Structure formats: C-alpha cells, structure tokens
Image (cartoon, rainbow, N blue to C red):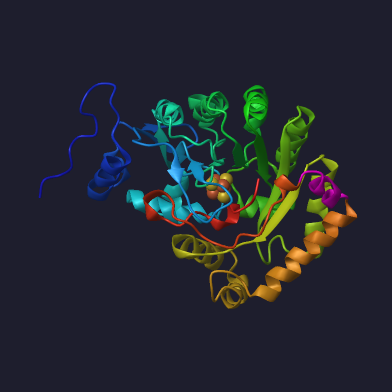
Amino acid sequence: MEGPEPLLFHLDQRPTTRQVADRVKHGGVDALTEAERRADQATYQEVDCRSALNRVKGMPFDWTLNPYRGCTHACHYCFARRYHTQFELDSDDQFASVILVKRNFVEVLRQELDRPSWQREQVALGTATDPYQPIEGRYKLTRRTIEALAKGRTPTGIVTKGPMIVRDRDVLSALAQAASVTVCMSVPTVDEHAWRTLEPGTAHPMQRLRAVRDLVDAGINAGVLMAPIVPGFSSARSKLERTVKAIADHGARFVGCNVMYLEDGTRTHFMQFIAREFPAMQPRLERLYTKKYPPENYRKEVQGLVRVLQDRYGLHKRRSANDNDAITEPETGATAEHNAPEPEQVAFRW
Ligand code: SF4
C-alpha cells in the first residue's frame, strides 16, 4: 500500500490537520519530519486550518476558537485528551507532547469576522486546549486572535491556566472597550500536592492567582474557575476553603466550580494514571465514577460547600455585581469540532 503524500507540497505551505492525521496513522509521530522538537520535549507541527470559528450548540457561547491542539500543561483530568484521537494521536502522552499549531489561524479568523453575515455572537477562546500554553510565547496566535476579535467587535470569554495572559493586558483592554471580554483563570485548587500530581505542566496556582490580580487591576473582568475539583485530591473541605480564600484574597471578580467528569479517552487515561500512581485510590474512584459524573448528591455537596465558602469570603457579592459574569454548572454537551462534544468542564456563562 502506498504511504501518504509528503507533508510539504510547496515551500511555505503547511499540511492540514487531516494530512497530519494520515501521516501519523501510517508512520507514527516520527513521520512528522518537518515538526520541530523543542527543549520542553514536545513536538510542534505547524498546520494550515480551513476555518477558525467553530459553531457550537447548547452552550452559553455560540462559537469556539482554538489556535492550538494538544496541550503541554498535561493535566491528567483534561477532557480534551479524547479529542486528540481525531488526529490519530493518543490521549496519553501524545496529547501533551505533540502540539498542532494552526499557523494561518488569525488570517482565517479575520476573513471570517469580516463577512457581512457575522453576527458578533459570543465566542469562547481556549475550550479544547490552553491558548496560553508555553508555545504561545513564540507564535503569539492568541494575542493576535484577541486583536482580531477587538477589531471585529466580538464579545469573548477566555479560559486558561497560563499566567502569560498578563502579557496581553493591552489587547484585552482594547477588546473590553470594543465589545466585552471575561477571563476565567482555571485554578482547581491551591493544594501543592494536588497541583504537582494532576497538572504537571502548569504554572503554580498562586502564580495564576497573581495573574488574576494583575488583570483585575488593569480593569479586566477576571475570575476563577475551580474546575475540575478532583475527588480525593482537591475535594477536602480544608483544601476547598484554602482555595476559595486565596481566590478572594487575589481580588477575583467571580468564582465557579465543577466536579471532575470522565469520558472516553480521558477516563482511560485518568484511571490508568490512578492505577499506576495511586493504586489504593482506584477502587473508590471506580465506585464513584460508574458513570460520567459522580452521583448527584456528591456533586451537590461539593458545590454547596463552595457556595458557603464563597459567602464567607465575600465572593458572592462580587459576582452579583455583574450577573452576566455568573458561572453556571454545565448541563449539556454540544456539537463541536469534528462532531466531538464540547468539553463540559468549561460550560460557563460569561
Ligand atoms: S490546561 Fe486545560 S487544555 Fe491544557 S491540559 Fe490542562 S485542562 Fe487540558
């Protein structure tokens, strides 16, 4: 059987994600001969995308934008792991070590925003990968995306674990003036052990909270998502309280929370990780996760506790100052890229 076409057909032309998937299917990651291997041990493959805006339904936002696929932050609970299999890449190590960079993303987005049919509906940036993972420092695709959204006067929400976002205070302010922008910094917990164990490639939680402070001080509507709270790692009352207090101390405008859910490749990866690293926890987690979510009474208990803590540390008052910033529990999935359901752990209202 003939192998796939070479990746590069002309100088300065990049393959599409489908061509990359074909290549990997036939020859593994080593077949990405033009990919760049960087000091962080990740492999970066530039691709050309055909569209940037991705329509979703049943979510508090109408469109999603993801300039990268895969994420070196490597969170073990990441819902987006399962989407990597769409590119013939696995949801384990390759999710965090083979990153697709949509090199022409901003140019495609600008064309889409310029269309007379564009209604300036709500856009969510960073739903299937972190838009401020380290490689953004080099490509600046997220920064240029925000500039394009400001020019297109498009209301936007951003979710990230990357303190690098403070670099973009200027363009975020421009977007806030042109339309609106809400930044949700993901800080599931400030517990050191849970952070090191579950989010090995991310910045320290306190560094993320300092970024929230910087954004709020710059006049940007920024808050925190405690999502996901992982049973057995970050669900203890004392850890929840330390986290909510730290969030309040850093001036977050709002806070939301959600308990981890597991599905498809994410479930496989997470349970294998637990079996390998924390075998004593496996039976309890298997019992708790007979379905996608833990039982409703467990989730309600955790959410109720966080609500009490929000009251105690004055976060409800801040939130009610602008109801549009309210974060809601996810209720539905949605149709997203390549017909995959959109991640529910970021189902919030801006
Ligand atoms: S930062 Fe977000 S996208 Fe990246 S691995 Fe963690 S949960 Fe997934």
Residue nearest the viewer, comparing 15 with 125:
125
Query: What residue appears at the point 68 percent right and 66 percent down from the top-left corner?
Result: 232
The vertical placement of 57 against 43, above or below, is below
* The magenta stretch spans residue 146: no
Residue nearest the viewer, comparing 244 with 287:
244
Q: Quadrant of residue 115?
A: top left
Query: What residue appears at the point 42 percent right and 36 percent down from the top-left corner?
Result: 52
* Predominant SS along the magenta part: helix
Image location (x, y in percent) of residue 82? 44, 56
Image location (x, y in percent) of residue 314? 88, 50
The C terminus sits in image quarter:
top right
Residue nearest the viewer, comparing 286 with 319:
319
Q: Quadrant of residue 301?
A: bottom right
Is 152 placed left or right of 323 in the picture? left
Query: What residue appears at the point 53 percent right and 68 percent down from the top-left corner?
Result: 275
The vertical placement of 274 against 56, above or below, is below
Is 168 placed left or right of 4 in the picture? right
Q: Residue furthest front?
A: 116
Q: Is residue 189 visible?
A: no
The vertical placement of 129 against 235, above or below, is above
Image location (x, y in percent) of residue 194? 68, 55
Q: Quadrant of residue 99?
A: top left
Q: Which residues are magenta?
A: 314-322
Query: What residue appears at the point 61 percent right and 59 percent down from the top-left corner?
Result: 330
